Image (spheres, helix red, strand yellow):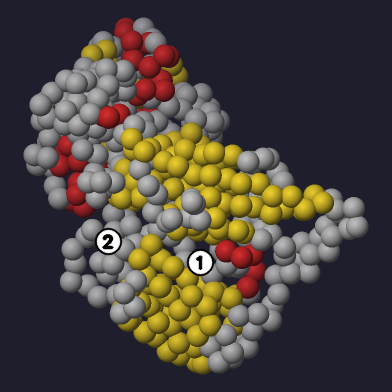
Amino acid sequence: MKIKAILSILAFGLIVGAYSQKNSMELTFTAKYNGQYISLDSIYIENLTQELDTTLYTPDTVLVLDYVTGVGDNGPIEENAFYVSQNYPNPFLKKTEVNLYLPKRDDIKITIRDLLGIIQVQYENILNQGNHSFTFYSGNSKYYLLTITGKRASQTIKLLNADSQTITDEKCKIVYSGNKGSVSSFKSQRNINNFLFNLGDHLRYTGYTNTIDTVFSSAVIDDNPQTDMDYEFSLINGLRCPGEPIIIDIDSNIYNTVQIGYQCWMVENLKTTTYRNGMPIQNVTANSTWQNLTTGAYAWFYNDISWKDSYGALYNWYATVNAGELCPAGWHTPTNDDWTELTNFIGGTGSSHGNELKSCRQVNSLQGGGCNTSEHPRWDESDVAGTDNYGFSGLPGGVRNSYGYFSMIGEYGFWWSSTMNTPEKAWARSLNSSDGLIFAFSYDKKIGYSVRCVRD
């Protein structure tokens, strides 16, 4: 029998008219990884309309939302109550932030324990009235319990560390980050018992788990639920970028995101046909035109738009540095240094590290499940398999060479940087189906390569 987390939506000061009617809906969550059902560790739920959030932890996989139809009034958050926000992000990599609101000056104590009850770190201070922020740096435990105690109140929250497989000698620590203003600035002002929901609210669900091979995975679903719903996460390796699990470009294409080290990357290749400033990018089909360009342009592989969703567009280098901006707001075409930071984080460019960035989708993959496929997008058949340890999910979109000819789809993936090497050449990176290397090289700016955006 599933344990259900009952989430009340009665706000402080809610007044319901005589003709109002209370209802509820049940949201059930399951998940698949590479075609196989897998249990979830946690589900992070955001009410984007009301800027509230909460988290379900295993074995809770059912969310029951109470809501009220009819005349009502959601009153303001009380300014005279002791509040501890859920940490953000949660799950987290390496560090996360917690907010505390004090209605008056208080002597507070913060204690962080692992699930065995062993104290990992403590903090004590006398703080003035207001909203205070703390940053927690984790050790190797997967779960932590953080308790904040004052003279008149105490609250505990649960923290989920997505980086628990990392071996490090660093000990847990908590650092005071300063006074952040009033309670209204909290990312999450209420705990699970005060999660508000009204019909029509936009909810976002992010599911997290460790796979059987200990690779951390997650997935995101957006919806405006109106009745009971069953949701199935299609898990992707890696942790979605905190605050931006998905991004949308100017053409309304949607991309997943992944955090790798201290960087956030797109999980898919860029598909936009319009610069950020609204100007169209030139679509060039004729080979004779392509080979003479010194301005930004793009093409679909074989000039066939049916390749768009599988591999994105192929852009010449001039498009990556166009003043109109190629990537969505807050994101940019990676520099050569951005690519180097990525490969340094995963351990270098040598054998096997390329496989760690490659999608596992492959013809006759020995890994089976959703990795074994002949349908694009995928890698050609090879004894070398992508393991996609970090969720980058590199796929072989091929190339349009400087003469305009297309080749190597399924065999090579090429990605531009925005960094020029010589007047004729710029830096790029590539992965291929036959080995696990990552190649850094500079080549003709007229060539069409894929683009992955990275967050500013």
Q: Which of 191 and 101 is in front in this view?
A: 191
Q: Is residue 51 left or right of residue 233?
A: right
Q: Tag 2: Cα neighbours inside 10 Å, few (<14), some, or many (≥20)?
A: some
Horizontal relation, residue 69 to residue 395: left or right: right
Q: Quadrant of residue 113?
A: bottom left
Mark 2 is on which residue type? Ser
Q: Residue at x 51, y 73 (%)?
A: 99
Say which residue label 2 marks: 164
Instruction: Quote the CA–CA distance across marks 1 and 2.
Output: 19 Å
Q: What residue is rendered at 33% in x and 57% in y?
A: 162
Residue 270 drawn at (x, y percent) = 40, 30
Q: Residue at the location (57% across, 64% down)?
A: 192
State left or right for residue 22 relative to residue 146. right
Tell me the kind of residue under disc 1: Gln
User: In this rendering, does residue 20 appear at all?
Assistant: yes
Q: Residue 132, image x and y in percent?
A: 52, 78
Please tell me which residue lies in front, 364 or 244.
Answer: 364
N-terminal-most mark, 1 or 2: 1
> In the current view of this chain or complex, which residue is farthest to the front?
1
Q: Which mark is residue 124?
A: none
Q: Name the residue under label 1.
A: 86
Q: Identify which residue is drawn at 72% across, 46% down.
A: 199
Marker count (numbered): 2
Mark 2 residue element:
loop
Would you say the residues marked 1 and 2 are in contact, meaning their CB atoms lie under 8 Å apart?
no
